[in-house]
Amino acid sequence: MSKTVLITGGNRGLGLALVECFAAQEDWKVIATARHMDSLPSVADEKLELDLASHESVTNLTDTIVQAGQTIDCIIHNAGFNPKDQKQTPGYFDSTFYCKDFSASNVSESMMINALHPMEMTGRLMPILTKDATVLAISSWLGSISSKKVPGHYGYAGSKALMNMCIKGLSLEFANDKETTRTAVAINPGWMKTDMGGSNADITPEQVAERILKMVEDGFIQSANGMFINTDRTEHLW
């Protein structure tokens, strides 16, 4: 029987690789989102618009999916925001990186896009999650408090740490629900060859996507509820 995966940020980098990887499997239906639907690959079974900076966009997306009467087996929260990409606004990155330049408003934008709206989206889709559904968050080693070595970095790293905490909390909610076997897992994809990671990185998005698919399909993810893991299946420090 066909399963359905919802992948956010499916138009480039790891998101695009995930869409293509899952779409290549006969038993997966892929719902892909991006801020602009025309940027999504044709292999996606369904293309929907999602701007995680907009609460209205989040509610519109979830209403559309719920009202369609379908169920979701896997959510992959891949879409995200890195303040260093906000080059058109002078000083924006510094205001999220250094305490001396700190802007609560700008840091909050990272929190909203990378953690809070994805969590609200998950909650709004909860009624249509299958009993053994998986919620995956593409996190980052920068979100690890235990291994924190980079000074500052409040916007991006802070938002990933927040999403990690949200996933941990959600995993405990799932564990307490004896009617389901749902799982919530945070994944560190590693240093990838993307626009963000550069050409000297260790691994391609396609390789990471294949690893994630295999972890979902062979049951590893279902045994990793509440964990922060690397794509080689080792556990990452929170």
Image (spheres, helix red, strand yellow):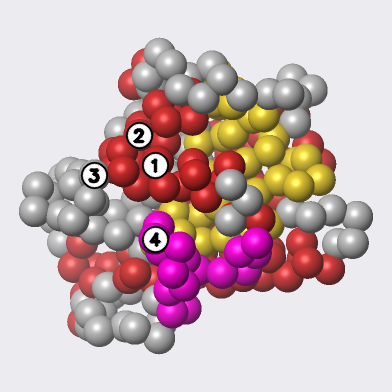
> Magenta region, mostly helix, strand or loop?
loop
Residue position marked by numbered label 3 in the rendering:
204
Residue position marked by numbered label 1 in the rendering:
209
Residue position marked by numbered label 2 in the rendering:
17
Q: Earlier in the sequence, mark 4 or mark 3?
A: 3
Q: Which residues are magenta?
A: 223-238
Front disc: 4 or 3: 4
Quick check: can you spot residue 126? no
For the residues bearing labels 4 and 1, Cβ distance under 8 angstroms: no
The residue that appears at 81% across and 45% down in the rendered structure is: 131
**CA distance for labels 3 and 1:** 9 Å
Q: Looking at the picture, tell me which residue is in the foreground, 166 or 98.
A: 166
Side (left or right) of 126 relative to 203: right
Side (left or right) of 102 relative to 6: left
> In what element is the residue under mark 4?
loop
- Residue 36 placed where, x, y %? 39, 24
In the image, is residue 168 above or below residue 149? Answer: above
